[in-house]
Each structure stands twice: as structure tokens, then as C-alpha cells.
Amino acid sequence: MKQILLFFFLLPASVVAQKTISLRECVELLSKNNLLYKQGSLQAESAEANLRQVRSQMLPQINISSNNSINLGRSIDQYTNAYIDQVYNYSSVNTGFNLPVYQGGKLQNQIRQNVLLKESALENRTAVLNAQTVLLMQGYVNVLATKALLESARQQVESSVQQVDRVQKQVSAGVVGNNVLFEIKAQLANDKFDEVTALNSYRTARLALFQRMNLAPDDQVEFEALLPLENELSTMAAGELYDNAQKTFPELKSAELYRQSFAYQVKSIKALNYPSLSLGAGIGAFYASTNNSLDYFNQLNATRNGSMNLSLTIPIMGRWITRPRVEAAKVQERLAQNQLDVSRQVLRQSIEQAVLDLNATRDQYASARGQEESLSASFTFVESKLNAGTANIFEYALAKANLAKAQANAIKSKYAFLMQQRLLQYYQNGSWIGVF
């Protein structure tokens, strides 16, 4: 009675310990824990910080300074400008103001460049998450596929165990010889080896998925099954899909924005060839201990002075310095254009491959299901003949091996089809909305 109560007491705990998570939840964990995605987020933050830093250069610069000194020996009295030879204290307070008025558009173009770089970093962050999501989805589907293969292998072991028990009874009854029992036990050993192999593949797939999410492996976690997408995929050709994808995919947006930023970098460099104008102002006061007639604050009030200046700088040979920098920036722009072309090529080829793979896996899945049904019926017939003593062990082993292979083909083609369905849906939508 105590054992029964203990069983019912522990049962809820074991049920609660099991947790099933979906593909959508895995993607959410990926976005929180994946280090490559975090790196993309940090790069976006860095681009935002650079933009703020450039914008701050357009603000007026205001500073306050203070100087205190003790003068020894022969020096000039700052209050009377006369030579003195004594120890005296000198203090000054100054406030300065400087504002860039015109710099040939240098700062404005730097701001435009950094705006594009920030937008490019944000798009790149999304692109990194999308690429990691594709890998995550492949790992998720691989876990489901290897689990189904493991269950199929266990069914094969159970079937062989039942045959061993049946043949053992026949041997005991003298109906068949020991050679049949040895053969069926050999089949059981092969099935157990296949089960162990399938178990290791399943564990490896689970470990890879947890590592993709940057989580510690948890044997209590199960993954939700995937069903075929309800909405039928449109029959758009790969070229049409690619034309639509060019407008939405962040990989291309990021590369295009990065390329455009160099045009403004060239303009900001060329601005160094133009005259620059800046406005400045300052006010100050000082105290000298040699003036005994006024105290500290009265001296500051009596010595206050101010100035305002307008500074013009005209570069004479600036082009000799800026020309190499402009050429280097234009080379970087061409490199960015080449990277954009590479991104377009990769996307186009990926879409072409996805369309081809979807059609191929759909046909393979349909063919594998038909093959499994046919060989399942064949195995049932051979098994009944073996039980009746009209079939030999070699016919049974061959039928069993063919059925196991057909079941494995059906499982692999099923999950390959589910994967390709979601991948092509992603290419059609331009995002993961509606895919999970």
C-alpha cells in the first residue's frame, strides 16, 4: 500500500518534469542566447553610437578652465605688466565657446554615411537571425527525424523478440531445429545494433540543437511534432520568387545600404578641400597677489575680459592628401558592390535549390509511403508463412530488412519535405511570419 501511495505521489512530479517546446519557442530561445545574433546586435549598437558621436560634432563646444600658479624670482606682474622679483600667486578663470559654421558639408555627409551604416547594421542583425533560424530549423527537423527512426528501430527489435520467443517454443516442441533459432537470434542482434545506432544519432541531433540555442542539454525536454503546412505553396517560378525576395530580404538591404554609405564618405573627404569657417568666443578673468588693493573677487571683476573671433581656414595643397583617401573609399565602394552581387547570387541559387528540393522531396515522400505500404504487406505475408512453417528464415530476414529500409526512407523523406515546405514558405514571405 505504501508503494502504491508513493507511486501516485511521485507521478505528478514526473509529469511536470516533462516539457514540450515548439519550433517557435526554440527560435525565441535562439534570439536570446545565440552568440552570433548577439554579435549582430552589438554591431548595430556600435553603429548607433558612432552616429551619435558624429552628430555631436555639430554641437557648440563650451569649456571652462582654471589655472593656479606660484611665481618665483624675476617675472612679469600680470596685473601691472611690470617686472618684479618676488614670490606671488596668480589665478585665472576662462570660459570658451567654439562652433563650426561651415566645413564644406563634411559633417553632414558623415552623418548621412553613419545613418546608412546604422540601418545596414540593423538589417544585418535580422539577416544573421534568419541564417541562424534556418540552421536551427534543420536541427529541429533532424531531431524529429532521428527520433522517428529510433522508434522504428525499436519496433524492429520488438518484432524480432517476438519471433525469438515463438521459435524458442517451436524448438522446445521439436517442430524446428536450433539452426532456425540461431538465425532469428542473429536477426535480433542486428536489430539491436541498429537501435543503438539510431539512439546515438538521436542523442547527437538533440545535443546539436541545444548547442545551437546555446542551452545546456536537458533530457526532460521534448520537441513538438511538425505537421505539413495547411496553406498550399504557390507555384511561382524561382525567378519570380527571387524578384520578390530582392525587395524584402535583409541580406540584400544590408549590403545595398553599406554600398551607398561610401558615396557620402567620398563627399565628406572631398569637403576637406574646401574652406572652413568657425565661430569662437571667450571670457576670462584673473587674480594676482601683488595687487593688495583688491581682494580675490574684486580682482576677478576688475580683470574680466572677453573676445569673439571668426576663423577662416583655406587649404592650399589639400587635394594631395585627400586624393588617395578618395581613391581608397571608391575601392571600398566597389568591394561593397561586389559583396552585394555575391549576396544576390547566393540568394538566387538558394531559392532555385529550394524550389527544386521541394518538388523532389514531395515526390520522394509520396513514393516512399507507397513503398512502405507495399513492403509492409509483403512482410506481413512472409511473417505469416514463417509462422506456418512454409517460409525459411532467409525470406523473413530479407522481407524484414526491406521493410526497415522502406520505413527509414519514408521517415527521412517526410521530414525533408516538411523542412523544404517551411524553407520555401520563408522565401515566399520574406520573413518567418506564418512559417512556424
Image (cartoon, grey):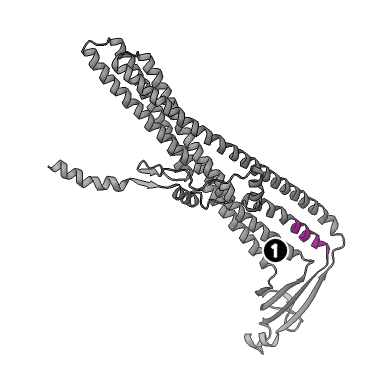
Q: Label 1's element? A: helix
* 77, 200: nearer the viewer: 200
Please give the residue where the numbered disc 1 appears in the rendered image.
111
Residue 175 image position (x, y, % from top left): 24, 11
Q: Quadrant of the N terminus?
A: top left
Chief secondary structure of the magenta portion: helix
* 238, 385: nearer the viewer: 385
Figure check: 44 above or below 407 = below
Please name the residue shown 61% across and 54% down the image. 123
Residue 211 image position (x, y, % from top left): 46, 42
Is residue 260 rendered to the left or right of residue 144? right
Categorize mark 1 by other alpha carbons within 10 Å: few (<14), some (14-19), many (20+): many
Task: Determine the residue located farthest toward the right in the rendered image.
Answer: 316
* 307, 401: nearer the viewer: 401
Please name the residue shown 60% across and 54% down the image. 43
Residue 78 image position (x, y, % from top left): 73, 80
* 168, 296: nearer the viewer: 168
Total numbered circles = 1
Is residue 329 rendered to the left or right of residue 136? right
Residue 306 image position (x, y, % from top left): 73, 82
In the rendered image, residue 219 lying in the magenta stretch gets the answer no
Task: Determine the residue located farthest toward the left in the rendered image.
Answer: 1
Please name the residue shown 29% across and 20% down the image. 163
Q: Amino acid at mark 1?
A: Ile
Task: Determine the residue located farthest toward the bottom in the rendered image.
Answer: 293
In the rendered image, residue 268 lying in the magenta stretch gets the answer yes
Query: The magenta stretch spans which residues?
Result: 263-274
Is residue 215 rendered to the left or right of residue 427? left
